[in-house]
C-alpha cells in the first residue's frame, strides 16, 4: 500500500482503483511479508546433517531435514548452502583391477626401493604440431623417475 500512496499522493482513491491504474494485483498490497527467524537454527541443523556424511549435498540435506520433522523449503536450503560456500567434495575414483580373468596380472604394492617399477607413454606436440612420444620409467616406492626416452616414434624394440 505504501507504493500506491507514494504514487497517488494524498488523494483519496480506493485500493481497487489504484491497483487497477498501476496494473498490479491487489494481493501485492494486502499480503504481509513473513520473514522466518529460524535461520541460525536451520544452518546449525544443516551443518549437523552435512558432517554425518561428507558426500551429502543440499538436496539430500533437504530430504533429511524433512524426514526429521522440519518444514523446510528446498530453495531456502540451497540458498543457505550457497551463501555458506559449502561444496560437496568430488568422489574419488576406485582403482581399477589390473588382472584378467585368468589371473595373469596382479598389482604389486611396493615394499622397498626398486621393488616395483611403472612405465607409461606420454604424448605431446611441439609448437609446430609435430608429435613427441615420451616413455617414462618410475620407481613406485620412491616415486623417482629412473628414465625418460623422448622420440618422434617409439616402437616395441625401443621399449
Image (spheres, helix red, strand yellow):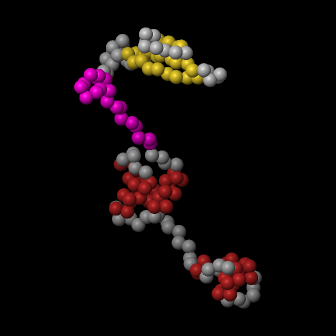
Residue positioned 68% across, 87% down in the render = 17
Res 157 quadrant in image: top left
Give coordinates of residue 67: x percent, y percent.
34, 62
Is any part of residue 142 visible from this angle? no
Q: Count the marks.
A: 0
* Residue 106 vs residue 110, the one in the foreground: 106
Give coordinates of residue 20: x percent, y percent.
67, 84
Instruction: Please provide the residue range marked out in magenta.
Output: 89-107
Q: Quadrant of the C terminus?
A: top left
The relative height of residue 36 versus residue 116 in the rendered view (above or below) is below
Let me know if residue 106 is in the magenta part: yes
Res 60 quadrant in image: bottom left
Residue positioned 49% across, 61% down in the render = 75
* Residue 44 vs residue 107, the one in the foreground: 107
Res 142 quadrant in image: top left
Is the stretch drawn in magenta largely helix, strand or loop?
loop
Is any part of residue 37 visible from this angle? yes
Amino acid at each position: 500500500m505504501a507504493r500506491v500512496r507514494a504514487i497517488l499522493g494524498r488523494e483519496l482513491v480506493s485500493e481497487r482503483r489504484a491497483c487497477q491504474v498501476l496494473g498490479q494485483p491487489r494481493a501485492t498490497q494486502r499480503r504481509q511479508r513473513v520473514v522466518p527467524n529460524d535461520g541460525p537454527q536451520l544452518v546449525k541443523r544443516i551443518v549437523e546433517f552435512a558432517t554425518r556424511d561428507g558426500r551429502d549435498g543440499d538436496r539430500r540435506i533437504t530430504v533429511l531435514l524433512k524426514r526429521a520433522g522440519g518444514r523446510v523449503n528446498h530453495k531456502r536450503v540451497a540458498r543457505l548452502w550457497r551463501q555458506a560456500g559449502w561444496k560437496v567434495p568430488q568422489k574419488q575414483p576406485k582403482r581399477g583391477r589390473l588382472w584378467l580373468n585368468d589371473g595373469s596380472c596382479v598389482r604389486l604394492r611396493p615394499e622397498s626401493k626398486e621393488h616395483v617399477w611403472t612405465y607409461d607413454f606420454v604424448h605431446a606436440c611441439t609448437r609446430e604440431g609435430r608429435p613427441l612420444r615420451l616413455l617414462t620409467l618410475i620407481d613406485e616406492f620412491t616415486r623417482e623417475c629412473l628414465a625418460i626416452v623422448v622420440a618422434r616414434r617409439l616402437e616395441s624394440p625401443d621399449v
